[in-house]
Structure formats: C-alpha cells, structure tokens
Amino acid sequence: MLTALTYRRARGLVLAVGLILLGLVAITMLLRGIDPVEVTATLMFAPLLAGFLFYGLRAGLALGLVASTIYLAMRWPAIRIVGFPAVAGLVFSRVVGFLAFGLAGGWAADRVKRGLDKLDLYDEIDDESGLGNARSFLSAVDLETSRAQRYEKFFAVVIARFSDAPWASERPRRRRAAMRAFGSHLSAGARATDHLAHGRTGTKHVVAAVLPETSAGGVRTFADNLSDAIKSVTGSVPEIATAVYPGDEDRLADMVEAFRRIDAASRPGA
C-alpha cells in the first residue's frame, strides 16, 4: 500500500539516515585515532538533529547552545593547560557549527513541515490508483448536494467493496503499476462529469463514484458495469451499494461517514 509523504514520515526517514551517517563518521574518526573529544562532539549533532526535526527552530537553537556549552566544558582542561588562544579556532568552529546546524536545520524543518502539511491539506489524489481519494469523494458529495438543493437537481453515488487484488503479493513496483492500470481501467468506463475515488478499509478496497444527474435506473446500470469491471480485473465480486439524492439521504449519510473514517485513517496524526 502506498502512503502519502507526510512530515512525520519524512522526519523519520531524515532522522534515520542522519543517525546512520553520524555513526559512520564517528566510527571512522575512532579508527583514525582522532581525539575522543572531537568524536563525542560529532555525536552531539545527533540530539541536535532529532531536536529540530521534532520541535523546530527554537529547539534547534536551544540544543545548539547546550551542545556548545558541553563542548566548552569538555575542552576546559585543555584551555587551563595551554590557554584559550591555542584552542580558540577549534572551539570557535565547533560552536559555530552547532549553532548553525541547529538554526539552519530548525528553519528548514519548519518550512518543510508547513509545506507538506499544506500539500496534505489540499491533496485529493489517491496515491495507489490515481483516482480521487476519500477527501475528494467527500468534496464531490458536498458539491453535488449543494447543487441539488439549490437547483433542484439530483445525483447518485455508487460504492463497491472488494477483497485485496491478486497483485497484492507482487513486488512494490509491479503492484503500483497494476493499481494505476486498474484506476485507468475504471476511469475509462465513466463520464467526464463522474467522480471516481478509491480508499481502503484494512485489506478491503473501496471504490466510490459520484454521478451527477443520474437517476435510480442510471445508477443501477453504472453499478452493474462497475461490478463487471472490478471482477474482470481482480476476480473479486464486489459488494455494491447505491444511493440517489434526494430520496436516499440516510444511506448517503452512511456512505459519507464511512469515507470520513477512511480519510481519517489515511492521515494518522493529522
């Protein structure tokens, strides 16, 4: 299953890669016989990285100051023996490095978080199928409900639930290609004005279609065609539910609530 890139996922990836790289640098320094104080100073970038990734610019600055203070304390015995001028360049470069890393990293983390949060807020494309996602279905239903109430029009909704497709056990690249082809196959059977969406509930796929100005007879025909299309590709016979507005308000409300849950589950921590 594909997942959208949220800040939480990006943060975890950057943190993992950063910790690995810092660990490799520290090991290399030890093998080369570098001063243990400098090895420790290198490892102090790890809490700095974690701090600004999780808490942003202020945490980056605060941890930069803490790291600088700890480094000065570790260098204090040498300062007392040889005097500060002898180690001033080394101390200055480390302090600037800690502060610059905390400030620049915290600023960048805040910007990336705002950007990804904004992208997630307005994203209405399902990453698996290329169809609309659960949020797009909710938006389409709201739009058609408003149109129906204002202009005395009608619309229909079809929902199809089916078990995980036969390509679920394939490698990720082939699975993505199969899901995209599946989405394109369904889109080919819809009108330009119809809105198709895809979501998941556990191992169950859920495909929904919002059909403007479609009557009970028209929605039955579309439902039969959708069922045949899903069965031809997946081999599964879907569970079909339909609703026409106005008339099936309670059934439509249940459909909307189901997609609200799918939308919430697709954005943990949102």
Image (cartoon, rainbow, N blue to C red):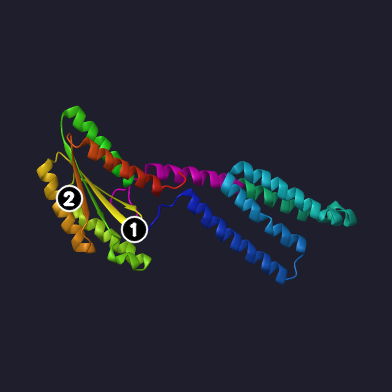
Left or right for 240, reference 106: left
**Residue 128 image offset from top left, x and y in percent:** 33, 56
| Residue 205 to residue 103: above or below | below
Left or right for 56, reference 212: right
Residue 190: mark? 2
Report which residue position mark 1 lands on.
203
Residue interval drawn in magenta: 104-133
User: Residue at 57% across / 49% down in the picture?
Assistant: 53
Left or right for 29, reference 193: right
Type of the residue with mark 1: Thr
Residue lying farthest to the bottom in this orientation: 31
Label 2, label 1: how far apart the Cα atoms are: 25 Å
**Residue 9 image offset from top left, x and y in percent:** 48, 53
Q: Quadrant of the C terminus?
A: top left
User: Residue at 18% across / 54% down in the picture?
Assistant: 226
Magenta segment's dominant SS is helix
At label 1, counting other C-alpha atoms closer than 10 Å, the crowd grade (few under 14, some 14-19, many 20 or more) is few
Dividing the picture into quadrants, the one containing residue 219 is top left
**Residue 79 image offset from top left, x and y in percent:** 85, 54
Q: Is residue 269 magenta?
A: no
Q: Could you tell me if residue 129 is visible in this image?
A: no
Q: Quadrant of the N terminus?
A: bottom left
| Residue 24 to residue 44: above or below | below
